[in-house]
Amino acid sequence: MLGITMVNIRLLRESDRPDVLEIARHTWDGYDYIPFFFDSWFKDESSHPVGIEFDGHIVALANLRVIDDGQTGWMEALRVHPNHRGKGLAVALTQYVVQVAKNIPVNRVRYTTAIGNATSLHLGETVGMTRKFDLAIHWQDNPAEISWHFSQRPMLEVTANDVYDDLIAAELLPYDTIIYDWKGIDATLDGLKKINSIAQFWVQKHEEETNSFSLGFAREDKSGSQWIFTIYAADTTGFLDHLSHHIHKASELKCTSIFVTYETRYTDVLSSLDWVKIDEDEDWALTLLELVL
Ligand SMILES: CC(C)(COP(=O)(O)OP(=O)(O)OC[C@H]1O[C@@H](n2cnc3c(N)ncnc32)[C@H](O)[C@@H]1OP(=O)(O)O)[C@@H](O)C(=O)NCCC(=O)NCCS
């Protein structure tokens, strides 16, 4: 089945960079984020990057990052070179990564994937993972071209410390987990501080209580920079206020595209906006999978 007589799984090294970049070049039309993260895996003790070597080259890889104060093994960056797909390498790596997580040990493993990525969903199932919740996603180019504006209630920029108690009390987050850029983290004070070190936070309040929250940050990608944001809102007005705010922000920062993650109950609201361009092939939601170890 494997077509590779002995699967040689090992920790990745910085010297594997050319092979890893070659795999990334063949993933998602070259829009893979791995080139922007590879170096950080070797500076960060919580990362455990692994790969499969064949004929002196890395042909498959994955990273396990320990987060949530040691509770969670976050599975990310699973990639197999197109020439080596369909041979069981992703299954072997997924099983291996779960074993690494058990050995550390952590209490659970998690990852997110697009709901249309049937292979990725199947891989999670093979190690016993189940879907916890879905969130909608949408990409769009040229935010500067969007002239739509919506502003009903004031938006306040806040810090992790400002927002922590209110955010949990507001019950806006499924499983008290914040999703940002395909990653998930527990909404503890420490988790919020970590996200706040790369992202800005905004809230809206009603009678002193937080009723909407969003985060946003810019990340370089192949064609410029992308404004990445996530919105959690108790009502449609809050959702639209944050959406408009982030589009304005992306435009102000001259980002070439936006990527929004938001609650599935607002998909009709988003798609009814006249500037929204939805590609039929576009994945419209991501899902978080989990296995308690
Ligand atoms: C997804 C990816 C890692 C799979 O790698 P692979 O080495 O070809 O996968 P494997 O050969 O180990 O097999 C995958 C499993 O999914 C199954 N599978 C394949 N296509 C499937 C589909 N459309 N629906 C359901 N299951 C599918 C296979 O049958 C196999 O399961 P099995 O062992 O129970 O038969 C690879 O295609 C890739 O790198 N894709 C781009 C990046 C990506 O999507 N990463 C994962 C999400 S971040």
Image: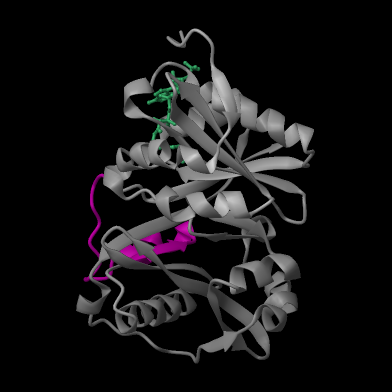
The image quadrant in which ligand 1 is located = top left
- Residue 260 inside the magenta-drawn segment: yes
Query: Which quadrant: the C terminus?
Result: top right
Magenta residue check for 62: no
Q: Which residues are magenta?
A: 258-281
Q: How is colour applied across the structure in the image?
A: one colour
Question: Seen in the image, is 74 located left or right of residue 154?
Answer: right
Residue occupying the point 56% across, 73% down: 234
Q: Nearer the viewer, residue 162 or 98?
A: 98
Depicted 13 relative to depicted 260: above or below: above
> Residue 21 appears in which quarter of the rendering?
top left
Question: With 239 as the anchor, is 26 left or right in this view?
Answer: left
Residue 177 in the image, given as x and y percentages of width and height: 65, 58
Residue 136 position in % (x across, y down): 44, 56
Q: How many marks?
A: 0
**Residue that extends furthest to the front in the rendered view of this protein:** 15
Q: Is residue 128 visible?
A: no
Q: Is residue 153 above or below residue 11?
A: below
- Left or right: residue 107 versus residue 91 is right
Asked whether the viewer can see residue 101, the reply is: yes
Q: Is residue 191 or residue 225 the one in the foreground?
A: 225
- Residue sitting nearer the eye, 38 or 177: 38
- What residue lies at 52% left-to-right and 43% top-to-bottom? 14
Q: Residue 5: horizontal and vertical position, in percent?
A: 49, 7
Residue drawn at 32 percent across, 84 percent down: 252
**Which x, y percent locates residue 128?**
64, 27
